[in-house]
């Protein structure tokens, strides 16, 4: 089982590079954090994502009963916890092979460009169409096509990696 939980945390970036910020999460002595609770239950944390003052934690629970216990404890200790979604891995699949791609990060135009490029064979090897042909199909400049495509790929790769 896998769960994403969002936690509002006061954070300031310690390093910025382009559109990416790096944070260090610290808390006072005696203040427990959700990560500590997950560790107490033996739930490995797969990923932390800090964005706009919100900390999203992806963690794995052994089964549904453990997940219920962990969520109950988190809600008791951290009333502001917001559980976004639960994902159950298919039988026999390794959890590290499952990745959730959040399409809502893409703008409508980026999604349209990705879908069109895919449908027209842009990602096939050998390519069935090139950037100029797809841009003409979308009635945009080829450089605009590439900009939208690169932005969309970056957002998808952020989730994937």
Image (cartoon, rainbow, N blue to C red):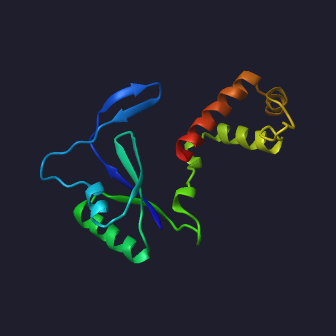
Q: How far from the left and from the top, in percent, is residue 74? A: 29, 64
Residue nearest the observer in this picture, 104 or 152: 152
Q: How far from the left and from the top, in percent, is residue 76? A: 24, 67
Q: Residue furthest right?
A: 128
* Number of dots carrying numbers: 0
158 relative position to 125: left or right: left
Q: Is residue 25 above or below residue 7?
A: above
Q: Residue furthest left?
A: 30
Q: Quadrant of residue 15?
A: top left
At 44% across and 74% down in the image, what residue appears?
63
Residue nearest the observer in this picture, 147 or 93: 93
Q: Quadrant of residue 99?
A: bottom right
Can the viewer see residue 141?
no
Q: Is residue 145 above or below residue 92?
A: above
Q: How far from the left and from the top, in percent, is residue 65? A: 39, 77
At 23% across and 42% down in the image, what residue appears?
26
Q: Is residue 92 above or below residue 38?
A: below
At 59% across and 48% down in the image, what residue appears?
103
Q: How far from the left and from the top, in percent, is residue 115? A: 74, 44
Residue nearest the observer in this picture, 17 or 82: 17
74 relative position to 56: left or right: left
16 relative position to 113: left or right: left
């Amino acid at each position: 089982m896998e769960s994403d939980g969002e936690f509002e945390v006061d954070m300031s970036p310690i390093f910025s590079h382009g559109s990416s910020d790096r944070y260090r999460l610290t808390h006072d002595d005696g203040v427990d954090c959700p990560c500590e609770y997950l560790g107490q239950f033996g739930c490995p944390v797969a990923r932390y994502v800090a964005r706009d003052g919100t900390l999203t934690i992806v963690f794995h629970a052994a089964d549904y009963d453990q997940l219920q216990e962990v969520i109950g404890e988190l809600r008791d200790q951290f009333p502001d916890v917001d559980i976004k979604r639960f994902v159950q891995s298919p039988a026999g699949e390794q959890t590290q092979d499952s990745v959730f791609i959040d399409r809502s990060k893409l703008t409508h135009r980026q999604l349209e460009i990705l879908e069109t490029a895919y449908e027209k064979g842009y990602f096939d090897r050998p390519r069935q169409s090139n950037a100029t042909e797809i841009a003409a199909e979308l009635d945009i400049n080829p450089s605009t096509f590439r900009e939208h495509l690169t932005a969309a790929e970056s957002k998808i790769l952020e989730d994937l990696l």
